[in-house]
Image (cartoon, rainbow, N blue to C red):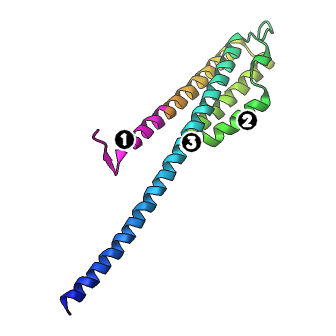
Amino acid sequence: MDAAVVTGISGFVVGVLGIAFGAGTAHAQRAHERWAAHEARLFEARREVYTDLARVLMRWSRYLDRLDPRSGDAPDVSTLLPEIEFFDLWARVSLVGTRDVVRDLEACEEVSNRFKRAVREGAADAVVADLRKEANRRFTTIAEQARADLTREDADAELRRSKVGGRARTT
């Protein structure tokens, strides 16, 4: 075979491979950009939902602390979130919250229901006090988990922004 023919064929093959590789790299870059944009939107949605959740948990905690089953006195229930808004918040948490936060919120709801039942049924003060403490511990656990999720995601996003082509940026 003539050297010119070999050179022409090899040049053609290299050119086709270069185009294919370039198209694959561009496709991978676009896929990464779509994924990063999705992660950024999820982070913002999660931050908003977790902020709303923290407000509700703080209200519930204060409500439980002020509730005195012996005297029948209770703070104004209107200070709490209306049930329909709570269900809306619950739905948003279940859609964008991490599994740990959703699991902890479900456990918190169960403890809160036991607490309300104990107060309604006139349970012993020690039982009510223990359930109040457990509910408040659950509130704290959820808040800490949400904070950890947001801190971890924020750090992960910063790390992704600082990487260029798989190598750490040197600027």
- Residue 103 has which mark? none
Q: Nearer the viewer, residue 84 or 108?
A: 84
Badge 3 density bin: few <14, some 14–19, many ≥20, Cα 10 Å: some
Q: Position of residue 132 (x, y in %)?
A: 66, 18
Amino acid carrying label 3: it is Leu
Q: Position of residue 164 (x, y in %)?
A: 35, 48
Could you tell which of marks 3 and 2 lies nearer the N-terminus? 3
Q: Is residue 162 magenta?
A: yes
Tell me the quarter of the picture where residue 74 sits.
top right
- Residue 42 has which mark? 3
- In the image, taking residue 24 as reference, residue 137 lies left or right, namely right
As helix, strand or loop, the secondary structure at mark 3 comes to: helix
Q: Residue at x 75, y 22 (%)?
A: 116
Q: Is residue 137 visible?
A: yes
Could you tell which of marks 2 and 1 lies nearer the N-terminus? 2
Amino acid carrying label 1: it is Ser
Q: Residue at x 78, y 29 (%)?
A: 83
C-alpha separation, residue under disc 3 versus residue under disc 1: 19 Å
- In the image, taking residue 89 as reference, residue 161 lies left or right, namely left
Q: Residue at x 68, y 17 (%)?
A: 127
- Residue 162 has which mark? 1
Looking at this rendering, what residue extends furthest in the bottom direction?
1
Tell me the quarter of the picture where residue 106 sits.
top right
Q: Residue at x 50, y 51 (%)?
A: 35
- Residue 88 has which mark? 2
Is label 3 or label 2 in front? 3
- Write the start and end of the magenta stretch as one range: 151-171
Q: Nearer the viewer, residue 9 or 119?
A: 9
